[in-house]
Amino acid sequence: MTNQRYKPENEAQLQELLAWASQNAMTFDLSGQGSRRGLGRPVKADAVLDMTAFSGIRSYEAAELVLTAGAATPLSEITAALHEKNQQLSFDPPDLGPFFGQEAGQGTLGGLIACNLAGPRRLSAGAARDHTLGVSAVSGRGDLFKAGGKVVKNVTGFDLPKLMAGSYGTLAAMTEITVKVLPAAEKSRTVLVMGLDDAQAVKAMSVALQSEHEVSSAAHLPLAAARASTVSYLSEAGGAVTAIRIEGPGPSVVHRCAALRDLLGSFGPTEELHAHNSRTLWQEVRDITPFAGTSTPVWRLLLPPSKAAGTVAAIARSLDVQPLYDRGGGLVWLEVRSGTDAGMAEVRAAVSAAGGQAALIRAPDELRSRVAVFHPQPEPLARLSARVKEAFDPKGVLNPGRLCAEF
Amino acid sequence: MRMPEPDAAVIGRRPSIVEALRAICPEPGAVITDEKELRVYECDALMAYRQLPMIVVLPSTTEQVSRILRYCHENEVKVVPRGSGTSLSGGALPLADAVTIGMGKFNRILEIDYDDRCVVAQPGVTNLGITKAVEHKGFYYAPDPSSQIACSIGGNVAENSGGVHCLKYGLTTNNLLGIEMVLMNGDIIRLGGRHQDSDGYDLLGVVTGSEGLLGIVTEVTVRILRKPATARALLMGFPSNEAGGDCVAAIIAAGIIPGGLEMMDRPAIKAAEDFVHAGYPLDVEALLICELDGPEVEVDHLIERVSEIARNSGATSIRISNSEEERQTFWAGRKAAFPAVGRISPDYLCMDGTIPRRRLPEVLTRMTELSNQYGLRVANVFHAGDGNLHPLILFDANVPGELEKAEAFGADILTLCVEVGGVLTGEHGVGVEKRDLMGSMFTEDDMKQQQRLKCAFDPQHLLNPGKVFPTLHRCAELGKLHVSGGNIPFPNLPRF
Ligand SMILES: Cc1cc2nc3c(=O)[nH]c(=O)nc-3n(C[C@H](O)[C@H](O)[C@H](O)COP(=O)(O)OP(=O)(O)OC[C@H]3O[C@@H](n4cnc5c(N)ncnc54)[C@H](O)[C@@H]3O)c2cc1C
């Protein structure tokens, strides 16, 4: 690692810098505030590319549902502006600072999009990628390009904004981003079902999701996770808690919560969380707080929801694990407390068998540099991904090694 | 519109290509060479452009698609993928020296999974076919292009199609979980799955809407949703387009995202009313249809709020549907808008730009000026919630020069959309229709970067050439780097 740091002031300087780097075998660690450095594989680069100059909200048209901002704009600034107009980024951006042992409230828009992060509302409202409408960026070749647009509906040209989302800064350095914003719900409440085991909980969430009650989020906190909550209904439950979030206009939320409690009553006793408690719970699920404050390895499992409990049970037969279920089971955060390399062999085998993917979301640098942090791809797809990288950054200037060992 | 010069050498090799395709697809009728049968495939729904394909092949397995593409890759034969041929931008327009690969035989639903709330289907299944397969259980597939009885789900993926409900429920891309596709070199890959999001580059996102330029989709997994408990609609008339536009903005500013929010201008209202007698008011300049869906209490509550907003925006008539039948009647005129216009004009062109909604009044005024200038009528229907305009330009193809005039008018409208901060196409795709306008929205560098992506999938530009990009640069040329030697620039850049 180096502490050489370059801070281009505008797109022209950024272009020239990256063009030079691509010609002269120089590599950069691309960072906004560096708050998400714990995600992905550690980058070993010649210098740090400091993007903080590309900051500030350029335009925000609440009635058009779009906001354009410099990629390095602090997320807190964007959230505050949206809050004033009663709007939000509906994909529920998580704040993973505390999870990674850092401060809360950090992070830039670009970092959020580059990692395609999303919280529990991902289930019903889409991920960061679904809300990324347009980007301007400088590729690893040093070319400035824009793609997408600044309106909510657009199919002109390839959807490169989606490609930028989740590319972890390995294709291009984003300078400006246009995101879709949406009204914040008038009311938000949570129905709790108490005491279910993982398999029953996934069933209960599936029943809720198949109902007409428009569930916005669905999570299951087994005993340990529930106990770690700051919401007393959960921490004092003495067992697992399954949570279903309902959002919308006031009368509708009241009605749907009542209907859901009826529907789920056969699974176990139900409770209802209002306002503050409801908000706190979903923040905790969003920010993986049950696993914050330690440094044990954590996996992110993406699974067909119906396979979630079975997959975790299969892993638990050989490893000491603690799960936290989100997205009705479609996402499992799995803390692993035993095994070699964070139980990689066992975790990947079980998840692959279920048709899912496993990413090592938190682990020591040493381990993350040595293994495939993201789910390995089969040969033809891996080759294609390498060609896509080459199309943007043929010399591997940007974030070498962050996504995989090969580039 | 100029298409790439057909390659006489490839056309000369037609017999051997036919033979190779027959070896791959031996089923009777799978390889079409007869001129009369080829005619069926000569155009899509952009009927102004026609071209007889060199050969049509109708594979029925992924393995066959893979072998066809590998053969074409190795023998440098161009291919044009085709679903149901309802593209309005000429995406499926054949080429004289290309094989059209029709996906119609891929017409089976493979799996319905209510627990994971998804359907796995072959790409030739129609959009409506998916909803039909799950509606007895109260489910549906949300994106609903007006062509849904005919268009294929594979075509929807290729065009990232929308529909009247996409403001609330998203376009195809937001409802797609996974695909299987074949690359030009014959490689079969899977993107996504039955879960949301994937590790690695979001190739699923970039293939969606790629208009058949990146590969052939052979299987599709989409998420299905439970049908909302109820739906009701409001029909609201306004004395001006401004007032109608203000009402749309006010609804959204109030935090309401309706299931559907459609607007029609005076000529469109008149044509629709004359055709289906839906009871539309004829003394208004703009008509809004606002549909609210969800639990009954929510819908009733929002109906009240929207009525109030409409009154405050100066609505001169407000009707609220009180039965499912009445709701359908409100929609009948809007849904029949295209054929209604077809009745009052021998031909029409359907445009598809998106604008920032607040610019609507000025765009409509400019459009009226252009209409006078070209001497051609225009009727407007649009997805008002997301600013997606569908101006219908009325003309008569039998009058010499009118098609060209209509096209020039259409091009002016689309560049106007870009000028006011919008885009060339909201849901119909670039195809051949808007290909030569791409430069009004993108710089040469923007388009080159898109083409570099294309090179990663199809280095010889064999998949659907002549579509989307006005000029195709050779991949070798696109790969060249800028020359910049010497010392690192900006030694004076702040370093720490
Ligand atoms: C009356 C009418 C109304 C319409 N209304 C709407 C609307 O409301 N919203 C909307 O978005 N669109 C609308 N459309 C446009 C059109 O229906 C859509 O673009 C549709 O998705 C095209 O599907 P298709 O199967 O007909 O594809 P085709 O027209 O056959 O092909 C379209 C493109 O997709 C490619 N393609 C097709 N299948 C595959 C495959 N399996 N793999 C890779 N590429 C493939 C083709 O190469 C071509 O580029 C309408 C069209 C008509 C005629």
Image: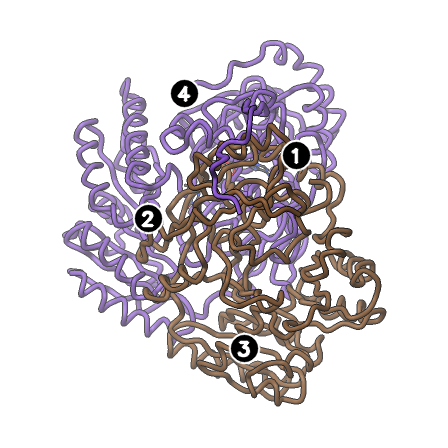
Chain colours: A brown, B purple
Tally the numbered discs.
Answer: 4
Q: Residue at x 49, y 47 (%)?
A: A51
Crowding at dot 1, Cα within 10 Å, few <14 / some 14-19 / many 20+, comes out as some
Q: Which mark is residue B387?
A: 2
Q: Which mark is residue A387?
A: 1
Q: CA distance from mark 3 to mark 4?
A: 58 Å
Q: Pointer 3: what residue?
A: A281
Q: Secondary structure at mark 3?
A: helix
Crowding at dot 3, Cα within 10 Å, few <14 / some 14-19 / many 20+, comes out as many
Assess mark 3: CB under 8 A from ligand 1? no
Q: CA distance from mark 1 to mark 3?
A: 42 Å
Q: Secondary structure at mark 4?
A: loop
* Left or right side of A38 for B366: left
Between residues A45 and B51, which one lies in front from this camera angle? A45
Label 3 sits on what residue type? Leu
Dot 1: chain letter = A
Dot 2: chain letter = B
Assess mark 1: CB under 8 A from ligand 1? no
Q: CA distance from mark 1 to mark 2?
A: 36 Å
Quadrant the N terminus of chain B occupies = top left
Dot 3: chain letter = A
Q: Position of residue A65 (x, y in %)?
A: 36, 55
Q: Pointer 4: what residue?
A: B1
Residue B37 visible? The answer is: no
Q: Nearer the viewer, mark 1 or mark 4?
A: 1
* Left or right side of B345 for B491: right
Q: Residue at x 52, y 28 (%)?
A: B40
C-beta proximity under 8 Å, tags 1 and 3? no
Q: Are marks 1 and 4 on the same chain?
A: no
Label 4 sits on what residue type? Met
Q: Up-down: is B225 above or below A187?
A: above
